[in-house]
Image (tube, coloured by chain):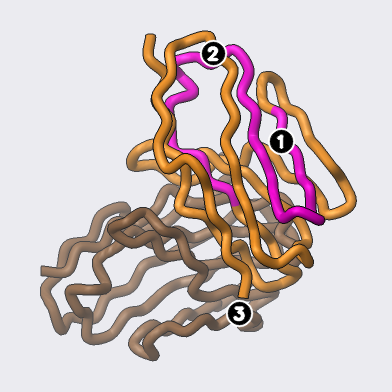
Amino acid sequence: DTAVSQTPKYLVTQMGNDKSIKCEQNLGHDTMYWYKQDSKKFLKIMFSYNNKELIINETVPNRFSPKSPDKAHLNLHINSLELGDSAVYFCASSPGRGGYGYTFGSGTRLTVV
Amino acid sequence: KQEVTQIPAALSVPEGENLVLNCSFTDSAIYNLQWFRQDPGKGLTSLLLIQSSQREQTSGRLNASLDKSSGRSTLYIAASQPGDSATYLCAGQGGADGLTFGKGTHLIIQP
């Protein structure tokens, strides 16, 4: 299936831990994104990579570090997790930087306890 | 910085009605305006994309319009069905800045 796939779908972890969320797209898109949806369901962009190059880095704590080993993968590593990091994290991709043809993954629900 | 507002926040209507969801944005220099649908526990599904040079797009029972001068977009759903129940999100694309989303309209279609 052509898609944007994220793993894991659910992640429950204790405060202070370090965790990673993985994202892969097989659509041949050049641009990948991480979005965060908070408890009020508000979606905000966190990072964007175009061909493995970071192009958007919103005001996000530096505990969050994206890594793109190739243009089909964009992983999100989070250090020293805090309660406020609990949210749903969505990966997305698009053919280019103009935002046409967005495809979203199904999300990773992160719960920090 | 771009801000996107959606009205109403929630809407419940009987099946078969035509309805309009509203979206407004503060920066008219958008690249495009997109409407998405989000079902509970699922990702976002792209519904319609209107380029900045266009005024409307149609897909089946959905029609989206864009008025850049007034900073408004509407999503029109004709002959609503229970399967249309979902949260509808409007988002503006500002060049390579990623999408700026509204908070969504939670729509319930009563059978």
**Residues at marks 3 and 2, CA–CA distance in whole angstroms:** 41 Å
Q: Which residue is mark 1?
A: B64
Task: From the image, state the color of chain A.
Answer: brown
Instruction: Provide the secondary structure element on which disc 1 rests.
Output: strand
Quadrant of the rendered structure where residue A12 is? Answer: bottom left
**Residues at marks 3 and 1, CA–CA distance in whole angstroms:** 28 Å
Percent position of residue A101, x then y: 70, 50
Which numbered mark, 3 or 1, is in the foreground of this view?
1
Percent position of residue B18, x then y: 59, 17
Q: Amino acid at mark 3?
A: Ile
Mark 3 and 2 residues: CB-CB less than 8 Å, in contact? Answer: no
Chain letter for the residue marked with disc 2 in the picture = B
Q: Which residues are magenta?
A: B63-90
Q: Amino acid at mark 1?
A: Ala
Quadrant, the C terminus of chain A: bottom left
Compare residues B22 and A17 and report the one nearer the observer.
Answer: B22
Compare residues B77 and B43 and report the one nearer the observer.
Answer: B77
Work out whether mark 1 precedes mark 2 in sequence or the reverse, and give the earlier one.
2
Q: Residue at x 69, y 49 (%)?
A: B72
Task: Mark yes or no: residue A2 visible.
Answer: no
Q: Which residue is mark 2?
A: B17
Give the chain ID for the orange colour. Answer: B
Judged left or right of residue A91, residue A14 is left
